[in-house]
């Protein structure tokens, strides 16, 4: 559950899965409206959050568009333009490492969590960067990861519900909450 932060200046780090990005752009996606609303709310309170995803998510999204969508290049370009400067793409490893070492580390993650390729890269990146909040429509894919690592796993709608509960509980306006900051389970990010 989300709580009001005591420290001003801290931003909550959110790692967002590719499915949320794709759904926010593609009107034919089942969760289009919810994903779009999630990003609108997050960007409306821009000073509260830092949005992260792996550099490999860009490839995952391009591949998803190429396999299943009409006009995949346009949709991919639209996605990049929409989120340019708002999303931080990060490497799966924090330090300079060889590609071979990176692959060996990611393979270990795949065996540990029994995840598919895209999910393994997300898990590995979240662990290396110690991000505690993961937003995805595929929560069932990450159940084992959540249990082993005590991360907060939300779909975009659940996250917004928690945000709204915090506003009601604190009796503060969203603007006042922005001034106070948030903390999740007593851990500063």
Image: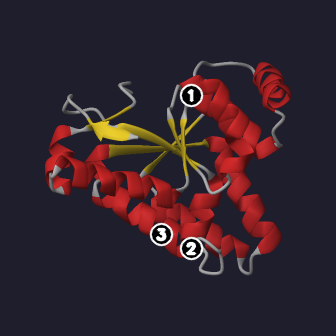
Q: Is residue 31 above or below residue 136?
A: below
Write down the residue under mark 2. 32
Tags 3 and 2 in contact by the CB under 8 Å rule? yes
- Crowd tier of the residue under label 2, counting other residues whose Cα lies within 10 Å: few below 14, some 14–19, many 20 or above: some
Write down the residue under mark 1. 150
Tags 1 and 2 in contact by the CB under 8 Å rule? no
- Point out the tag, 1 or 3, that comes first from the N-terminus: 3
Write down the residue under mark 3. 36
Q: Which residue does the image show at 69% across and 58% down from the upper left?
A: 61
**Residue 85 visible (yes or no):** no
Which image quadrant for residue 92? Answer: top right
Question: Which label is found at residue 113?
Answer: none
- Point out the tag, 1 or 2, that comes first from the N-terminus: 2
Q: Secondary structure at mark 1?
A: loop
Q: Position of 183 compared to 60: left or right? A: left
Q: Secondary structure at mark 3?
A: helix
């Amino acid at each position: 559950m989300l709580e009001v932060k005591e420290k001003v200046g801290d931003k909550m780090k959110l790692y967002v899965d590719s499915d949320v990005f794709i759904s926010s752009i593609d009107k034919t996606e089942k969760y289009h409206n919810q994903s779009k609303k999630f990003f609108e709310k997050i960007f409306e309170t821009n000073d509260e959050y830092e949005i992260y995803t792996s550099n490999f998510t860009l490839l995952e999204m391009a591949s998803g568009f190429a396999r299943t969508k009409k006009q995949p290049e346009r949709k991919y370009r639209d996605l990049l333009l929409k989120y340019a400067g708002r999303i931080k793409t990060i490497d799966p490893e924090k330090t300079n490492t060889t590609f071979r070492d990176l692959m060996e580390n990611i393979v270990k993650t795949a065996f540990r969590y029994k995840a598919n390729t895209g999910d393994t890269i997300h898990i590995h990146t979240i662990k290396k960067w110690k991000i505690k909040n993961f937003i995805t429509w595929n929560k069932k894919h990450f159940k084992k990861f959540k249990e082993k690592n005590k991360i907060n796993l939300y779909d975009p709608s659940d996250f917004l519900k928690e945000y709204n509960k915090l506003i009601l509980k604190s009796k503060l306006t969203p603007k006042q909450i922005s001034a106070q900051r948030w903390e999740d389970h007593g851990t500063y990010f």
